[in-house]
Image (cartoon, helix red, strand yellow):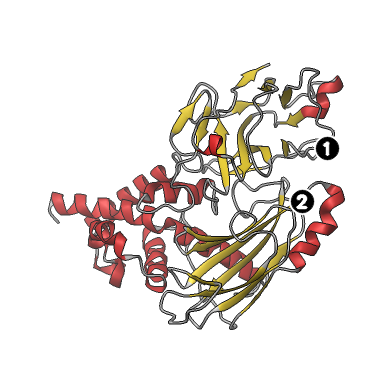
Amino acid sequence: MAATALDDLKTAAREAFLFSLPLVEVATTRSRGQAVGSPMNVFGHMRRLADHRARAVTTPNNDTFYSTAQVDLSQGPVTITLPATGDRYFSLALMDAYTNNFAILGTRTTGPDGGTFTLVGPRDAADGPNMVRSPTDHVWALARVLVDGPHDVEAAKAVQHGLSMQGPAVDFPGPFAHRGAPWAEYFDTAARLMAANPPLFSDRAILAVMAPLGLANFDPARFSAEDVAAIEAGLAEGRAASRRGGLTGSAFIEGWTYPSARLGDFDQDYGLRASVAVSGLAALPPAEAMYMRAEGHLRGALYDGLKAWRLHFPADGMLPVNSFWSLSLYEATDDGQFFFTDNPLNRYAIGDRTEGLAANPDGSLDIWIGHADPGGARTANWLPAPAGPFALFMRAYLPRPELLEGVYRLPPVTEA
């Protein structure tokens, strides 16, 4: 094959990996659920707050219960019933097969009174009130129910109990390769998932770039050894690119990165979509929740838990939110994912609802971060870290306009 054609094949493999990675990550999540008996088109409820043992999805939160359903609309619509939630934060994110949030039901959008909604696929001719149309047949429905501390667990469970889905019984045949699989296995999976969930017309330009790989009728046997080397090189570039950026976007201001406006509904930003699938799968759009990562003076750097750190909010500089904020601490894996770390307080996040959190006499607030207990009154505001590298992510639910529009900026995390 000529050098130009090999370059085109390498580029096709890189772009096809980035384009398809969200499909593969969701299929992996779906397969894990099926392996433990979770059927399609039925909500499963997770009634424990995530801790250091939660390793199914990267960057879990410790603020909400999750309810999750993997949906297949190819055999007909499903009906979703939402409970009344009152003042409690609740959201049901509906993500297409490529992880775009095409609709969010709940506190911000449909209000506190609940209701019944019909979810239909892209080729379903049905129409009517409270109908939500998905751009793909496969949908991930992920609900978040705020748990306002240990005293609130049973009430939060009661809200989950009121969330239900009714639809046809379907199966989702596998197996599917994971993102680290050899090239032929990976792209065979990608081709099957794309056939089940055809890309949109607005993806035609990137599909043309991917065309030399032949995913529309994928046959790995047609490639020569020289071709395979180019494909593997492109795949390696795609994997490296997927570990850059992601959940918190590109704006880096005073030690914090801020999310892209495209987070959670990515349009044609396939690189962002892929990196979020690795570092923050199922992230909400900024209007629902903003995710900020503290990175000190060096973009992408991790913090050292053997040092002491401080986050200081002045009295007039608290996070402007209409719901709540939460600072989560994670240890990092070698492949760029983040999970909670074991600690003596069993505290994985700290925020405006943390029991016993103490403000300073002037109304300001200090959060103390590190492996060693800061001691005395500071322990109440201590976020424990491992004796090694860690990452900090801030979540702000239902951010106010000044945060969404960049008028408000978080104070930096400094060495204590």
**Is residue 374 shown left or right of residue 93?**
right
- Residue at 77% of width from left, 55% of height from top? 48
Residue 56 horizontal side relative to residue 94, left or right: right
User: In terms of depth relative to the viewer, which is nearer, 143 or 227?
Assistant: 143
Q: Can the viewer see residue 79? A: yes
Which amino acid type corresponds to the residue marked 2 in the rendered image?
Val
Q: Nearer the viewer, residue 188 or 271?
A: 271
Describe residue 332's horizontal placement relative to residue 369 as left or right: left
Q: Secondary structure at mark 2?
A: loop
Where residue 9 sits: x, y (%)? 23, 55
Image location (x, y in percent) of residue 21: 43, 56
Q: CA distance from mark 2 to mark 1?
A: 12 Å
Question: Which is nearer the eye, 102 or 238?
Answer: 102
Above or below for 378 versus 83? above
Numbered marks: total: 2
Q: Quadrant of the N terminus?
A: bottom left
Task: Confirm whether residue 218 shows in the render.
Answer: no
Q: Is residue 331 above or below residue 57?
A: above
Label 2 neighbour load within 10 Å: few <14, some 14-19, many 20+:
many
Q: Quadrant of residue 52?
A: top right
At label 1, the amino acid type is: Glu
Residues under numbered marks 2 and 1 in contact, where contact means CB atoms less than 8 Å apart:
no
Residue at horizontal 45 percent and vertical 44 percent from the top: 261
Within 10 angstroms of label 1, few (less than 14), some, or many (20 or more) residues?
few
Residue position for label 2: 147
Q: Which residue is mark 1?
A: 355
Q: Is residue 95 above or below residue 262?
A: below
Q: Judging from the image, what secondary structure is the residue with disc 1 in?
A: loop
Residue 355 location, quadrant: top right
Q: In x, y percent, where is residue 328?
A: 66, 38
